[in-house]
Image (cartoon, grey):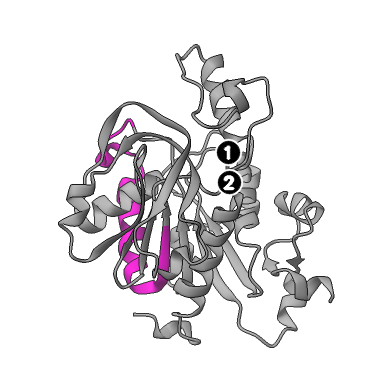
């Protein structure tokens, strides 16, 4: 069986820095020229990248999207009402577009990443009005939208009025989670207990979600609270954790905050014997792979019309 049949072709610009690492990891990346000669319609997925170090997040998400046999065409975009200080303008100009330029398009899927703005009220985030416009647009122009971490809280607030609440201390580490609805396609193949990285200062309350008849709680944790909430029509998926994180992402966050002089607890259930000198244990890779694969398959590919113009 050749490489193309073994792994998913991700269609992205050929000189994106992530490509070199993806190829090293044996992830098949299709060129635009080759994609044009394949007699299939690729899924079109837009990624609104709100994270400061955008290349790191690109690589994390592209890894997770690399596990189905479906060709995926990626459009990266960023808020045009916010100046990114941690990613070069050259990178943004070369590989990113803006909502203004794509809002006339329709997409099979949309991913909205987390953002380090939890200390702010939603209305105080300088790109909040633009994000509201994007989330409203997604209701009629995207088959299914996956919101991650802060974006999950922002999406629940915008679409359903669910508030976020500050935690006593940062929810930081890798936590045990359970499945509430084993028949939900999004968690098909999950173990009864699985692990998820969490890194956040705010939370949403279960009691408020239960009051929303349009929402369903799919997964939660006794320690870290709600994890996956979906709209019952599967058009909106809210994931409060960071299943896309690399093995060393929590370590990098921990070391960064210590270097700033911040008082930080060790990330829970991460270092063997709670010894930061030891290599962290990766407990979430299989669940993370399934989460993204199931979203692409059951919530995007199985639901989207062949003709994107038919999305309503």
The residue carrying mark 1 is 53
Circle 2 crowding by C-alpha within 10 Å: few under 14, some 14–19, many from 20: many
Q: Is residue 165 rendered to the left or right of residue 257?
A: left
- Using the image, determine if residue 52 lies above or below residue 180: above
Residue 29: image location, x then y, percent: 74, 64
Per the picture, the main secondary structure of the magenta-coloured stretch is helix
- Using the image, determine if residue 237 lies above or below residue 245: below
Q: Is residue 68 rendered to the left or right of residue 159?
A: right
Residue 90: image location, x then y, percent: 65, 44
State the residue in front, 37 or 161.
161
User: Is residue 152 located in the magenta-colored stretch of the structure?
Assistant: no
Query: Looking at the rendering, which quadrant does residue 39 occupy?
Result: bottom right
Q: Nearer the viewer, mark 1 or mark 2?
A: 2
Circles 1 and 2: CB distance less than 8 Å? yes
Q: Secondary structure at mark 2?
A: helix
Quadrant in the picture for the C terminus: bottom left
In percent of the image, x 38 and y 35: which residue is there?
117
The residue carrying mark 2 is 57
Residues rendered magenta in the picture: 119-146
Cα–Cα span, label 1 and label 2: 7 Å
In percent of the image, x 59 and y 64: which residue is there?
74
Q: Is residue 260 rendered to the left or right of residue 88?
A: left
Quadrant in the picture for the N terminus: bottom right
Residue 26 makes an appearance in the image: yes
User: Is residue 123 located in the magenta-colored stretch of the structure?
Assistant: yes
């Amino acid at each position: 069986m050749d490489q193309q049949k073994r792994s998913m072709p991700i269609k992205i610009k050929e000189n994106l820095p992530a490509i070199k690492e993806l190829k090293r990891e044996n992830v098949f990346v299709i060129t635009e020229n080759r994609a044009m000669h394949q007699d299939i319609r690729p899924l079109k997925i837009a990624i609104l990248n709100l994270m400061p170090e955008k290349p790191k997040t690109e690589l994390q998400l592209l890894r997770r999207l690399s596990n189905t046999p479906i060709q995926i065409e990626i459009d990266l975009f960023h808020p045009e009402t916010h100046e990114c200080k941690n990613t070069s303008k050259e990178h943004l100009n070369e590989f990113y577009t803006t909502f203004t330029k794509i809002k006339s398009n329709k997409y099979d899927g949309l991913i909205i990443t987390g953002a380090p703005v939890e200390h702010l009220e939603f209305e105080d985030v300088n790109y909040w009005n633009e994000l509201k416009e994007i989330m409203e647009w997604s209701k009629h122009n995207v088959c299914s939208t996956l919101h991650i971490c802060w974006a999950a809280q922002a999406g629940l607030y915008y679409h359903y009025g669910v508030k976020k609440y500050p935690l006593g201390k940062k929810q930081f580490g890798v936590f045990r989670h359970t499945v509430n609805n084993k028949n939900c396609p999004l968690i098909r193949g999950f173990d009864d207990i699985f692990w998820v990285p969490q890194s956040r200062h705010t939370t949403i309350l279960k009691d408020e979600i239960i009051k929303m008849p349009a929402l369903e709680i799919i997964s939660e944790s006794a320690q870290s609270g709600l994890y996956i909430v979906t709209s019952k029509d599967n058009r909106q998926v809210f994931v409060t954790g960071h299943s896309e994180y690399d093995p060393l992402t929590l370590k990098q966050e921990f070391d960064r905050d210590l270097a700033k002089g911040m008082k930080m607890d060790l990330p829970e259930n991460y270092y063997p014997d709670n010894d930061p000198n030891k290599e962290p244990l990766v407990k979430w890779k299989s669940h993370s792979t399934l989460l993204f694969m199931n979203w692409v398959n059951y919530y995007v590919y199985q639901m989207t019309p062949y003709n994107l113009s038919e999305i309503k």
